Image: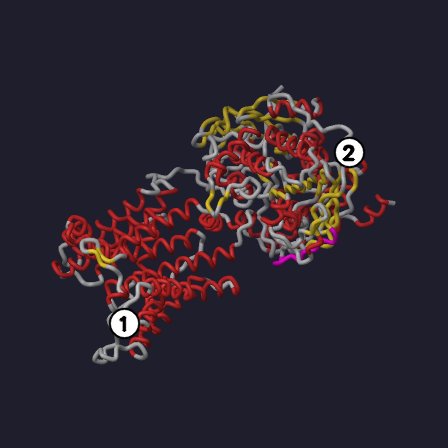
């Protein structure tokens, strides 16, 4: 049931979503087909899936580390933005250079550090003052967005950009390599990263520590694991990966930094993490499923006139149904109760 | 002559859970005014049986008769309506409320506080119990709290009173008081069903005993005519193995010494450790007795390293100061510990036995290289423990949560003992464990001491401590009494030390005088 529940959740989403949109006047079944099935069948469109899946998978595996330790990082969106901004800072500082093979790695490193630094704040607040990391990380997301707007409208505005709020376009040596048919480098890298996280979680002492802290905090203390250190390390690891996903997006599909940079990947990644049962390999599959809904949602807008928010509705329904079907993992439905229950 | 009507009669009562036959055609009878023992190890089916009598569960088949009439008991409320009362092993009390408020909360009928207080005082007077209805529960000792539960049951004027393991939390003096109360109850015509595994108590108190093993009734006897040993053998269905303690062992130098070990408690209900002093020699087993809630847990955490103390020299191992060190550093120096709670503290229930081995043995058994865990090393050690300690499990991949309490405890003990620690500190080593596993654990502790390690055993089971320890100390309100050789101290003295402030200071002075 543990693995059947997510599949059940997806099927329920398709069925209920189709019904809801039928009631709204659209062709419900066609909508479900367009959103869920078409993108998988159309091989030519798989590249689009990769574009969407890569950041989702990367952020989600990072989040899963923390979630397994009971550390709830909800601010991945903010960390993603900060990573993009930090990498962009390096790009703008080196923009006048004619080349340099070290520039792109430096941007990526800056992305990781930027994302991690943004999570250091909730980590400090939690370990020092017991501030709930759900609130602190979430609220920092909005700070990150405002920081982005400020930079776009002010110091980082492209001087040759006709006053549009956006940075210069990155130079070739500052862009992620692109492989036609596959996509930017971040697509294969995201799978490698997922594999790496799987190895760390399953085989290393750090992964063991995370799992013990998440399942039995007293046993973790007994076994000599510091829950404080675990909070720090898991928050920084998750945020670092989110930041890396951020700079990958900026140096890949976007090619610059723009105010529209926050696309909600940081939040959708939470759904991906849980749909994938917090397991890196499950997350890869879940990332692909959610990428399907993005791509399918866009094409359904075009062909069926579905509203733009339809994609979000389906994604949210999926998480909702996953939580609901999770009950079936531990309990069975029985029709007709028995008399003589405890009063 | 008419046949005497039994107060309670069970006929062929059976209860099955998925995979387990908890009660197999159990039949026995209790006469009015009789104190009847239900004897059996953990897992024998006593709790399930009693839950059916009190209406918490329903039997799958068979009949329960009260005063000769077959009845259905669908709920505890219905049971109380029939005059069946129960005092559980674990109390349902709110520490922040008073005695009166607690009893009022659990009442079936609506009574004004004044009326309820009158009735409570009536019950207290009738049975010679002392309890102040306006005391806050948090200020009461465990024995006094149990009295609240007893009063709660007695308010209903029960015909049958079920007591579930009542003495596991009492000092010897409180046990005598409880027995007097029960005897006067029985004389008044109330039947008592007394569940326990403590044989000498059953011999002292009970008129009849029914012995359960593996869900079946294996015997009925009159305790006064049996010996503790014969009842024990009926309970475990075999011959009791005596613990083999080496005779004339020479104890070596002091290995584990605490000097003025103090630790302030956090929170409202924590116990602070105050100037705890003890010294354990090589080959010695120090037993620490005490009633629950007097700082045992805090002491174990301070000794194991989970709560280090500021003053490093307050605790030394082979003359090395370890007080400020954490659990990992202490393990490296040879100190292993086993906390009281096996599920969630000593072991992770959702992990396999091999993964649980990594929890504490990874250092001393070299399971980690360059940050990567060696799965074969963990598996091998887990298998070694399973084999050496006879743990009934499907293998090292079995989930810890799937093992029975006794088997998990054997595994946890084995995991620590096979690391051959220099010092081993254990708390409640055989709590909730069947007699066979308990004997194996006891033997392992004795063997470890024989090798020259120093052991500290913290336990609420006096019998266990008297069996194992070379010397005894008593912990009360965070203070440790000076250690005494086991054969030099009497049960009365121990009981008085355990009672401490709640007991009688003058009696304590008189005992020493």
Measured as percent of width and height from the top left, residue A207 is found at 44, 49
Q: Quadrant of residue B42?
A: top right
Give percent across and percent down for residue B510.
85, 45
Q: Residue furthest top?
A: B1
Residue nearer the viewer, A245 or B40: A245
Judged left or right of residue B398, residue A102 is: left
Q: Is residue A88 above or below residue B214?
A: below
Location of residue B475 in the rendering, given as x and y in whole percent from the top left corner:
72, 47
Residue A313, x across and y down, in percent:
25, 58
Q: Which is more toward the observer, A60 or B125? A: A60
Task: Give left or right: position of B438 versus B183.
Answer: left
Determine which residue is flagged by label 2.
Answer: B250
B265 drawn magenta: yes
**Chain ID for label 2?**
B
Horizontal arrangement in the rendering, residue B363 relative to residue B142 (left or right): left
Mark 1 crowd level (few <14, some 14–19, many ≥20, 10 Å Cα): some
**Closest to the observer: B144 or B443?**
B443
**Residue B163 is a magenta residue:** no
Q: Which mark is residue A259?
A: 1
Q: Residue at x 47, y 48 (%)?
A: B371
Q: Identify the magenta region.
A: B259-268
- In the rendered image, the residue lying farthest to the right is B513
Which structural element holds mark 2?
Answer: loop
Residue B184 in sight here: no
Image quadrant occupied by the N terminus of chain A: top left
Chain assignment, label 1: A
């Amino acid at each position: 049931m543990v693995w059947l529940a997510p599949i059940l959740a997806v099927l329920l989403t398709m069925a209920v979503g189709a019904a809801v949109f039928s009631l709204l006047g659209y062709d419900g079944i066609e909508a479900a087909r367009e959103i869920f099935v078409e993108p998988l069948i159309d091989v030519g469109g798989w590249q689009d899936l990769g574009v969407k899946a890569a950041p989702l998978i990367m952020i989600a595996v990072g989040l899963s580390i923390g979630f397994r330790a009971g550390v709830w990082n909800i601010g991945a969106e903010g960390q993603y933005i900060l990573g993009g901004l930090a990498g962009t800072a390096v790009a703008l500082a080196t923009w006048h250079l004619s080349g340099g093979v070290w520039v792109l790695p430096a941007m990526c490193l800056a992305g990781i550090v930027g994302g991690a630094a943004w999570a250091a704040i909730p980590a400090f607040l939690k370990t020092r003052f017991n501030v709930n990391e759900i609130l602190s990380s979430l609220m920092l997301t909005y700070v990150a967005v405002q920081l982005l707007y400020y930079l776009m409208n002010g110091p980082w505005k492209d001087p040759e950009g006709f006053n549009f709020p956006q940075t210069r376009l990155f130079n070739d040596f500052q862009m992620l390599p692109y492989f036609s048919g596959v996509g930017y480098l971040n697509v294969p890298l995201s799978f490698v990263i997922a594999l790496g996280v799987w190895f760390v979680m399953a085989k290393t002492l750090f992964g063991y520590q995370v799992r013990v802290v998440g399942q039995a905090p007293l046993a973790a203390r007994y076994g000599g694991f510091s829950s404080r250190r675990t909070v720090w390390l898991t928050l920084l690891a998750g945020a670092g990966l989110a930041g890396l996903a951020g700079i990958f997006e900026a140096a890949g599909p976007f090619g610059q930094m723009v105010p529209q940079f926050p696309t909600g990947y940081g939040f959708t990644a939470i759904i991906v993490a849980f749909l994938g049962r917090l397991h890196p390999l499950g997350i890869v599959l879940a990332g692909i499923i959610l990428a399907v809904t993005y791509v399918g949602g866009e094409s359904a807008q075009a062909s069926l006139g579905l509203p733009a928010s339809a994609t979000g509705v389906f994604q949210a329904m999926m998480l909702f149904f996953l939580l609901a079907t999770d009950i079936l993992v531990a309990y069975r439905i029985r029709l007709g109760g028995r008399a003589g229950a405890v009063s | 002559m008419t046949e005497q009507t039994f107060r309670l009669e069970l006929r062929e009562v059976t209860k099955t859970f998925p995979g387990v036959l908890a009660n197999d055609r159990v039949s026995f009878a209790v006469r009015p005014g009789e104190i009847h023992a239900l004897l059996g190890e953990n897992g024998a089916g006593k709790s399930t049986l009693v839950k059916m009598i009190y209406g918490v569960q329903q039997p799958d088949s068979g009949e329960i008769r009260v005063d000769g009439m077959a009845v259905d008991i669908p709920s505890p409320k219905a049971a109380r309506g029939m005059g069946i009362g129960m005092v559980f092993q674990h109390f349902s009390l709110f520490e922040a409320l008073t005695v009166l408020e607690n009893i009022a909360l659990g009442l079936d009928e609506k009574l004004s506080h004044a009326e309820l207080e009158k009735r409570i005082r009536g019950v207290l007077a009738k049975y010679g119990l002392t309890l102040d209805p306006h005391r806050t529960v948090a200020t009461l000792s465990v024995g006094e709290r149990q009295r609240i539960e007893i009063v709660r049951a007695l308010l209903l004027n029960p015909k049958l009173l079920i007591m579930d393991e009542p003495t596991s939390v009492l000092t010897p003096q409180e046990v005598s008081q409880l027995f007097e109360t029960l005897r006067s109850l029985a004389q008044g015509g109330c039947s008592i069903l007394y569940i326990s595994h403590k044989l000498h108590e059953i011999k002292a108190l009970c008129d009849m005993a029914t012995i359960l093993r593996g869900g079946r009734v294996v015997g009925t006897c009159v305790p006064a005519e049996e010996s503790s040993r014969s009842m024990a053998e009926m309970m475990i269905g075999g011959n009791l193995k005596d613990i083999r303690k080496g005779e004339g062992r020479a104890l070596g130098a002091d290995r584990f010494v605490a000097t003025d070990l103090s630790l302030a408690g956090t929170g409202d209900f924590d116990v602070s450790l105050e100037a705890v002093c003890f010294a354990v020699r090589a080959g010695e087993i120090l037993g620490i007795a005490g009633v629950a809630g007097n700082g045992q847990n805090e002491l174990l955490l301070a000794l194991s390293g989970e709560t280090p103390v500021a003053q490093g020299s307050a605790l030394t191992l082979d003359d090395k100061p370890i007080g400020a060190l954490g659990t990992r550093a202490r393990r490296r120096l040879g100190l292993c510990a086993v906390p009281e709670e096996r599920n969630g503290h000593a072991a992770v229930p959702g992990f396999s036995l091999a993964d649980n081995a990594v929890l504490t043995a990874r250092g001393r058994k070299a399971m980690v290289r360059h940050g990567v865990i060696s799965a074969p090393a963990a598996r091998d050690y887990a298998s070694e423990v399973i084999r050496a300690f006879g743990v009934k499990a499907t293998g090292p991949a079995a989930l810890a949560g799937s093992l029975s309490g006794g088997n998990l405890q054997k595994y946890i003990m084995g995991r620590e003992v096979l690391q051959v620690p220099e010092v081993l500190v254990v708390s409640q080593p055989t709590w909730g464990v069947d007699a066979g596993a308990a004997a194996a654990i006891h033997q392992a502790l004795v063997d470890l001491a024989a090798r020259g390690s120093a052991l500290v055993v913290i336990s609420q089971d006096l019998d266990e401590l008297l069996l194992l320890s070379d010397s005894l100390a008593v912990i009360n309100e965070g203070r440790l009494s000076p250690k005494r050789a086991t054969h030099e101290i009497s049960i009365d003295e121990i009981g008085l030390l355990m009672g401490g402030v709640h007991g009688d200071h003058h009696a304590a002075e008189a005992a020493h005088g």
